[in-house]
Image (spheres, rainbow, N blue to C red):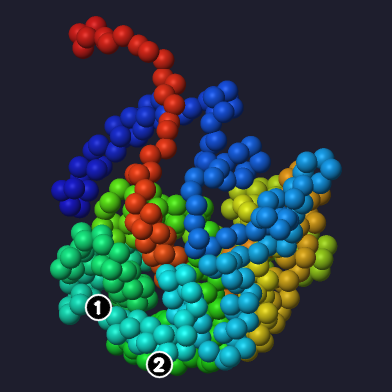
């Protein structure tokens, strides 16, 4: 046992006692939030996000709007739900995906261009941009050995954040926050993060699971989706459908409004004037949280638990299991059916609508049609089960996490990389939000917290 481990063994009982005191004096009575009209979690009583900024990068719509963009209400003043719409720079995500698929090309790089520059690229611009990203898809000499292979983490998001922060030391102009320099840094990270993520996993497998260490050199001519699959697989081989499906998933996760936790983090930390690497590491820390980036992992684990515990795959037995989930009698006993419902969407999540078709095709290729059928059955039955047992103020839509974990699993992507792949995709949106925050030269984002601690007199040490 090391000296530090011996110290921990000695002090942990004291720390545990102190932690009880810390927690007891940190809990705030929920009624205070109502009494002072404080929007806890920046949400109103119905769970709607409080407006904290403006963005032109993307827009989410889940309620009907009139021609002026105002929300439409019924005769009782209630908002009227609509099928979910996600727009990147004003363009419907379904049209963007349809365009790439219809022209038989990978689209993530085109989406990165759109999010960063506000316009779709011409054929010449896209070709040049892909070449630029491919050229950046490399890491500094010995970076893998000196950074990724040193003290490898058991959590790939930690490894990713550490790698991003360390890139500061390899940058000749790390603190220059001019738009041109920040754009250069963002483009490099967009290209480098797939390498950081996959290499972190390969090293983790070697050191913690005692597998062979295989690290492939990136090929700049490949798309981001192709590159990730080639880097991850020992033989570097993948089918076209696999790469196309991953490309679609990267597109769908690239951005999702400015109000999600990690994008808001990007704005908050950028507003302080700090460097790009610190900002992206902060956003990665946000996405690492299971309430934000880890939902698809929960879906896959819930699904595996369901398969082990179902008596049969009949509607009745699936309903029984779903009710057990809601009643905190199954899986992790959280009372949640993971992948069902969304903070914004009411009737449908457009990303899930797009993903569903590719999931079915990939399931057929992988001979997992029975699993896809079970997913489809859950998607059909879960909203009914939830509506019967709980009061809900809006519809319960299947969200993109419901299918994205299944896609990752079918692609042979290990669970340790589920959230890092989300980060690889969302790096595009974070970059656009960082540039937007810096371009508008706003004040540092500083929310107000109301102090509610009672005033007390100081007591001298000898009288306590």
Residue 350 placement (x, y as % from top left): 65, 67
Residue at image x 77%, y 44%?
78
Say which quadrant the C terminus sits in: top left
Q: Secondary structure at mark 1?
A: loop
The residues tagged by marks 1 and 2 sit, at their Cα atoms, a distance apart of: 21 Å
Q: Is residue 225 left or right of residue 434?
A: right
Residue at image x 58%, y 77%?
96
Above or below, 412 against 13 in this view is below
Q: Between 345 and 464, which is closer to the camera in this rendering?
A: 345
Q: Secondary structure at mark 2?
A: loop
Residue 53 placement (x, y as % from top left): 48, 48
Residue at image x 22%, y 48%?
5
Number of disc labels: 2
For the residues labelled 1 and 2, say whether their Cβ atoms are less than 8 Å apart. no
Which residue is denoted by mark 1 in the rendering?
139
Q: Is residue 251 left or right of residue 172?
A: right
Above or below, 381 against 105 in this view is above
Residue 50 placement (x, y as % from top left): 55, 43
Q: Residues within 10 Å of mark 1 (few under 14, many from 20)?
A: some
Q: Residue furthest front?
A: 68
Q: Between 138 and 410, which is closer to the camera in this rendering?
A: 138
Which residue is denoted by mark 2 in the rendering?
235
Q: Quadrant of residue 438?
A: bottom left
Residue 342 placement (x, y as % from top left): 63, 55
């Amino acid at each position: 046992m090391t000296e530090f481990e011996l110290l921990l063994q000695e002090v942990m009982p004291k720390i545990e006692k102190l932690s009880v005191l810390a927690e007891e004096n940190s809990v705030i009575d929920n009624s205070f939030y109502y009494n002072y009209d404080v929007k806890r979690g920046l949400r109103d009583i119905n769970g709607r996000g409080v407006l904290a900024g403006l963005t032109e990068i993307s827009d989410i719509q889940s309620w009907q709007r009139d021609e002026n963009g105002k929300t439409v209400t019924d005769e009782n003043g209630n908002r009227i739900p609509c099928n979910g719409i996600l727009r990147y720079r004003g363009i419907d995500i379904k049209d963007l995906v349809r365009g790439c698929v219809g022209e038989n090309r990978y689209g993530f790089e085109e989406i990165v261009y759109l999010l960063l520059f506000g316009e779709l690229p011409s054929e010449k611009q896209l070709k040049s941009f892909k070449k630029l990203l491919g050229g950046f898809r490399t890491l500094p000499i010995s970076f893998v050995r000196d950074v990724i292979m040193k003290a490898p983490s058991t959590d790939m998001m930690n490894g990713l954040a550490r790698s991003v922060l360390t890139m500061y030391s390899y940058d000749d102009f790390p603190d220059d926050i001019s738009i041109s320099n920040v754009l250069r840094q963002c483009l490099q990270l967009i290209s480098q993060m797939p390498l950081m993520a996959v290499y972190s996993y390969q090293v983790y497998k070697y050191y913690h699971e005692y597998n062979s260490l295989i690290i492939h050199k990136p090929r700049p001519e490949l798309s981001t989706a192709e590159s990730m699959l080639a880097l991850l697989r020992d033989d570097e081989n993948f089918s076209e459908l696999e790469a196309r499906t991953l490309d679609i998933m990267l597109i769908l996760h690239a951005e999702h409004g400015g109000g999600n936790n990690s994008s808001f983090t990007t704005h908050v930390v950028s507003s302080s004037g700090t460097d790009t690497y610190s900002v992206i590491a902060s956003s990665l820390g946000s996405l690492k949280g299971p309430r934000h980036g880890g939902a698809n992992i929960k879906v896959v684990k819930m699904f595996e638990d369901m398969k082990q515990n179902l008596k049969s795959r009949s509607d009745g037995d699936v309903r029984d299991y779903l009710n057990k989930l809601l009643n905190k009698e199954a899986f992790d006993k959280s009372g949640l059916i993971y992948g069902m419902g969304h903070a914004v969407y009411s009737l449908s999540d457009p990303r899930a609508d797009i993903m569903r078709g590719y999931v079915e095709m990939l399931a057929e290729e992988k001979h997992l049609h029975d699993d896809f059928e079970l997913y489809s059955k859950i998607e059909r039955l879960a909203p009914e089960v939830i509506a019967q047992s709980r009061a809900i103020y809006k519809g319960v839509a299947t969200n993109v996490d419901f299918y994205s974990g299944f896609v990752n699993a079918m692609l042979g992507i290990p669970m340790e990389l589920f959230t890092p792949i989300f980060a690889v995709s969302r790096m595009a949106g974070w970059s656009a939000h960082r540039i937007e925050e810096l371009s508008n030269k706003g004040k540092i984002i500083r929310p107000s917290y109301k102090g509610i601690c009672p005033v007390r007199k100081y007591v001298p040490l000898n009288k306590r």
